[in-house]
Image (cartoon, grey):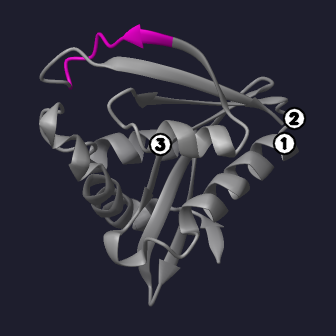
Amino acid sequence: MIRRANEADVPGIVRVVNEAFEVEREFRKGDRTSAAEIGALLARDVFLVTEQDGRVDAAVHVRVTGSIGYFGMLAVARDAQGAGLGRALLDAAEDHCRRAGCTKMTLSTGEDRKELIPWYERLGYRVTSIEPSTSSAFSRVIRVVHMEKPL
């Protein structure tokens, strides 16, 4: 079951996101996120989560800005991968944005995450731009791929 997250879910979201983004350690300084960041995002946006036995096992951050939806930090715990939770959360994020009046869904990912770009393309997303990151979160310059899909 997918539900909207609340403040009690912050530690679980942090755990799942940091675990899922562990593959970025090669170019990312430190953890992908923190309780402070998730709490701040949750105060203004939405996180959708799935859980098993009371424990968050997947999460996605969703933002609506006018007619444009955005999702990020799509993450599934290692022991829950392969069960379709990522796709189900992405579908729920898109539905959330459609209901809010969005006509377009966007995302950004690092070019180094080569497995993700084709997956998003199979789901109807297309690359709109690629640019170098200016974020100090990275230990080296990475190229950020921006993608979008009509809703």
* Amino acid under disc 1: Arg
Q: Which residue is mark 1?
A: 98
- Residue 146 placement (x, y as % from top left): 54, 21
Q: Main secondary structure of the magenta part?
A: loop
Q: Which residue is mark 3?
A: 116
Of 46 and 131, the residue lying toward us: 131
The crowding category of the residue bearing disc 1, from other C-alpha atoms within 10 Å (few below 14, some 14 to 19, many at least 20), is some
Q: Are marks 2 and 1 in contact (CB under 8 Å)?
A: yes
Q: Foreground mark, 3 or 1?
A: 3
Q: Nearer the viewer, mark 2 or mark 3?
A: 3
| Residue neighbourhood size for the residue with mark 2, other residues' Cα within 10 Å, grouped as few (<14), some (14–19), many (≥20) | some
Looking at the rendered structure, the secondary structure element under dot 3 is helix
Q: Which residues are magenta?
A: 130-137
- The C terminus sits in image quarter: top right
Q: CA distance from mark 2 to mark 1?
A: 5 Å
Q: Is residue 67 left or right of residue 130?
A: right
The residues tagged by marks 2 and 3 sit, at their Cα atoms, a distance apart of: 26 Å
The three-letter amino acid code for the residue at tag 2 is Gly
Between marks 3 and 1, how big is the CA–CA gap?
Answer: 23 Å
Residue 2 location (% of width, % of height): 64, 70
Q: Residue furthest bottom?
A: 53
Q: Is residue 98 above or below residue 66?
A: below
Where disc 1 sits, the SS reads helix
Of residues 25 and 31, the one nearer the viewer is 25
Q: Earlier in the sequence, mark 3 or mark 1?
A: 1
Judge whether 128 appears above or below 2 on screen.
Answer: above
The residue beneath circle 2 is: 101
Q: How packed is label 3: few (under 14 Cα within 10 Å), some, or many (20 or more)?
A: few
